[in-house]
Image (cartoon, rainbow, N blue to C red):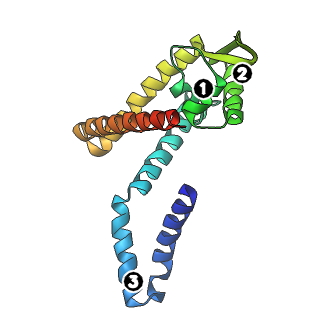
Amino acid sequence: MTNYFLFTTFALEIIAYNHKAMLDKKTKNKLEHHMIARKRNIARLIYITHRHFNEWAQKKWKDDGWDDIRPEHLRLVSIISMEAVNINELSKRARVSKQAMSKMVNDLISKGFIEYETDPKDTRSKIISISKEGVDFMDYFLGCSKKLEKNFEDIIGEKKTQQLIDILSELTEGIMESERKEQQNK
């Protein structure tokens, strides 16, 4: 649905630019309204910010020698915590399939960011924990976050950037709490 929405949004932009003269007056007005409204379209705003982060992070990480790390690895690194957990629990937290999580886990094990041991309760299962290298990457990532924050400050100012962080933090915690409740009700 999201990809369809994004495709539709970008297709409308192209159509508006290239074929405006071919539209009747009522449709032109409607299209102009959509072009104005898109500046406050939350899905578009989140997508562009997400895209900016991914492009910025991949370039930064490559420049700093972490070119084998991809933004999707953050899904796992961001949910791993102090306690060791199995792949089933990680896949629930990340909201991905066990197969997708297993691939991410194996990828990060090969990079040395996480470690595993066999689950004493189930020898088929792995217990995952963060490694020293993983903690080092978290330190590095925190530094990158501060640089990204500075980039945002250059665009919207320090006060608005701090407000943005406060709002995103509240929103993120609310989303995570909602997801926890949803999982408990299953």
Residue 126, percent from left and from top: 70, 18
Task: Indicate the quadrant where residue 118 lies.
Answer: top right
Compare residues 119 and 20 and report the one nearer the observer.
119
Compare residues 99 and 186 and report the one nearer the observer.
186
On-image quarter of the N terminus: bottom right
Q: To which residue does mark 1 refer?
A: 89
The three-letter amino acid code for the residue at tag 2 is Ser
Mark 1 vs mark 3: which is more N-terminal? 3
Residue 97, percent from left and from top: 66, 37
The three-letter amino acid code for the residue at tag 3 is Lys
* Residue 15 visible in the picture: yes
User: Is the residue marked by circle 2 packed among few (<14), some (14-19), or many (20+) residues within 10 Å?
Assistant: few
Q: Element at badge 3?
A: helix
Q: CA distance from mark 1 to mark 2?
A: 20 Å
**At 60% across and 26% down in the image, what residue appears?**
89
Q: Nearer the viewer, mark 1 or mark 2?
A: 1
Mark 3 vs mark 2: which is more N-terminal? 3
Q: Element at badge 2?
A: helix
Q: Residue furthest right?
A: 124
**At 42% across and 90% down in the image, what residue appears?**
24
Task: Indicate the quadrant where residue 88 lies.
Answer: top right
Q: Is residue 43 above or below residue 17?
A: above
Mark 1 vs mark 2: which is more N-terminal? 1
Q: Nearer the viewer, mark 1 or mark 3?
A: 1
Q: To which residue does mark 3 refer?
A: 28
